Amino acid sequence: MKREKIFNRNRVHFFAVLLCSMFLFAGCGGNDDGGGSVLMSSVGQSGADIVAHSAQAGGASLAAPNAQQAQDKAAAKNADKNTIFLSKTSDEIMFVSSPAVYDLSQITVTAPNPAGKPIDRTDYPHTEWTLVSGLGTLTGRIYASSAPETAVFRAIYSHGGEVNTADFILRVVGLASISIAKTSDSLSVTAAGPNFYDLAGVEVTANYSNGVSKNVTNDPATLWTLVSGQGVLNGKVYTPASAPSTAVFSAAYSEAGIVKTASFSLAVVDLIPPSVVLSDNHPDAVVQKGDVVVITATFNDNDRIAEAPAPVISIGSVIAGATMTMIDNLHWTYTWNVQPSVYGLQQVSVTAFDASGNRCAPATGKTAYEIKNQDPVKYVYMMQLNGISYTCGVAVDNDGYVYATSQDHSVRKFSPGGVLVKKWGSLGTGNGQFYYPGGIAAGPAGEIYVADEYNSRIQKFDSNGNFILKWGSLGTGAGQFNRQFDVTTDRQGFVYVADRMNNRVQKFDSNGNFIFKFGGYGSGNGQLSQPLGVKVDASGNIFVADSFNQRVQKFDSNGNFLLKWGSYGAVDGKFNLPSSLAIDEAGNVLVVDHYNHRIQKFDSNGNYLTKFGTYGRGDGQLSGPYGIALDASGIVYVSDFYNHRVVKFAPVF
């Protein structure tokens, strides 16, 4: 009976354990809601008791390892019971329109059951989403973003008082910038063209906040504007108005209300050479010595003519690389004082550069001159003016009338044709009287000056011989004279006197007021020995016939020595008492070589050019000539002292 009770009690425990095992199995795997957890909690304790009890009944050797496994499972369950898992196909969206929408329903939410098995909780009523941070709006599970951003969401799964969470970061990707890629950032403007720049060749790339980019060069949303530049942008074609210049363009690309821009600078480079047209103030293309030709270069250029180096002009072999003068940037001039050493046709060229370094094209317009040879190859006899006693001085006024001094103490006036029209003067010391008059000069206003040698004075008359004034007396002081032999005037009307026995030259104004003197006896540079002649050129240089030193000396307008030439002799370039001088329009100096009975011609630096005249009484011959004068056409008048006449010579070119 006792055995039967024990057996029956053990049988009840067995079935109880078996039933609990069945319910435990059902609670772990047969239900997917919280009831399983709850069930696992209520039954597990009895099972433990059962297990523990079974261990007391003698199953201890098996109970220890089974208990360790249960503890490990319990620890794993406790570690995961507050964890949920999110599974998504994408964590970013493109902001291509506003708003950009993201549906959080596409994210799978997984949470483990108490047994550790992951269960899909996506649509479970206790699964909720909240917006942690973001610029948009979350309505249910639909998020509407208003701008590119990074939004943070939180999935919350709650049951039985427990709250499980997981965060999800969504990147709303939008337009971040645009960039420009070009093969050239300059436009070379050439004469051949085409002189425009097509922006269609500039690649525009849109860059997004996720590092992705795309080509939007031809996208209608890509627009070009001209920010600065002297030109016209028509669509994508830019035509500059001038060169060189810099044009700045802006490319703008818009997407979903976002506009990004990038700038592009275009250097417009001028490769077109300037053109130049030449003109002048001269009536034709034939020039000669003494002409002053103002040549004007008119440039046409996209840019401006460089001032350094300035334009230069060359005229054949006469002028080489002379610097021109700027009137304004496109007009430059050169004043050509024609003093050629060669003659004939001379081509004109201009070298100039614009600010871009382009050399000007060959000049057009007046690009050649014929230089006429104004240096006579010889002088030929024309005629003679007679009726003069021992002719000493000779002069020609602006109207071509000829005046000559005569040693019968008078002055003769002849018409341009050689007819005697006037005679005045007689021996004496009164006004208008003379005592062996020497040199004579016609001033720029038509006045006549006579060196009244032995009366030690200068007398001034009008062109009809009417006395005007006089100055001077015998002596060595300023304004005094000792056998002054020659008188001349310059283009301003100042009067110069060769004060023979005082070995000097004196300068006066037209009223006889003393200005300065220079010279002094001697043979050194600037010293004089009985000078008989003096003349002044167009530049104010003073030439003196230093007679007893057998030479000619040249001084500047202040009487400072410049140079000298000549010595005693009869060969070319040598003298036997040089007595008077004349200067032609080209600046050449004609010297009366008294005892060699000839006229020698030199350039302004004393280089010998030619000669004419021989001793005798025939036509064109001379005997002891003293004075010389030139008219406006270059005809030469020589006072032929011992032949009692004035001889007229014509230049032959």
Image (cartoon, grey):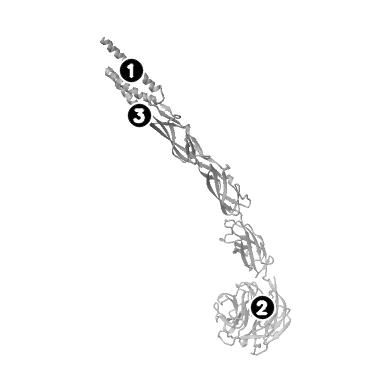
How many marks can you see?
Answer: 3
* Quadrant housing the C terminus: bottom right
Asked where in the image residue 65 lies, by quadrant, the reply is top left
Is residue 37 in view? Answer: yes
Instruction: Report whether 421 appears left or right of 503.
Output: right
Task: Name which residue type carries label 3.
Answer: Asn
**Of labels 1 and 2, the one closer to you:** 1
Sort mark 3 into few (<14), some (14-19) or many (20+) by Cα contacts within 10 Å: some
In the image: residue 562, left or right of residue 373: left
Residues at discs 3 and 1 in contact (Cβ within 8 Å): no
Please state the horizontal and vertical placement of residue 202, each as a whole percent of the image: 56, 45
Circle 2 — which element?
strand
Above or below residue 49? Residue 134 is below
Badge 3 or badge 2: first in the primary sequence: 3
First-in-chain label (3 vs 1): 1
Point 34% across, 23% down: residue: 42
Q: Marks 1 and 2, Cα distance to the nearest angstrom?
A: 163 Å
Work out how far the residue at label 3 is from the one at label 1, CA to CA, in angstroms. 26 Å
Q: Identify the residue position indicated by label 1 in the image.
A: 17
Three-letter amino acid code at the position of disc 2? Ala
**Is residue 618 among what the camera can see?**
no
**SS class, disc 1:** helix
Residue 474: x %, y % from top left:
58, 88
**Residue at position x 31%, y 13% from top?**
11
Q: Residue furthest top?
A: 1
Q: Secondary structure at mark 3?
A: helix
Percent position of residue 119, x then y: 42, 27
The residue lying toward the viewer, choosing from 24 and 368, is 24
Within 10 Å of disc 2 (Cα), the crowding (few <14, some 14-19, many 20+) is many
Q: Which residue bears the numbered disc 3?
A: 78
Which residue, given by chain and number where applicable, does mark 2 sit on?
Answer: 629
Mark nearer the viewer, 3 or 1: 1
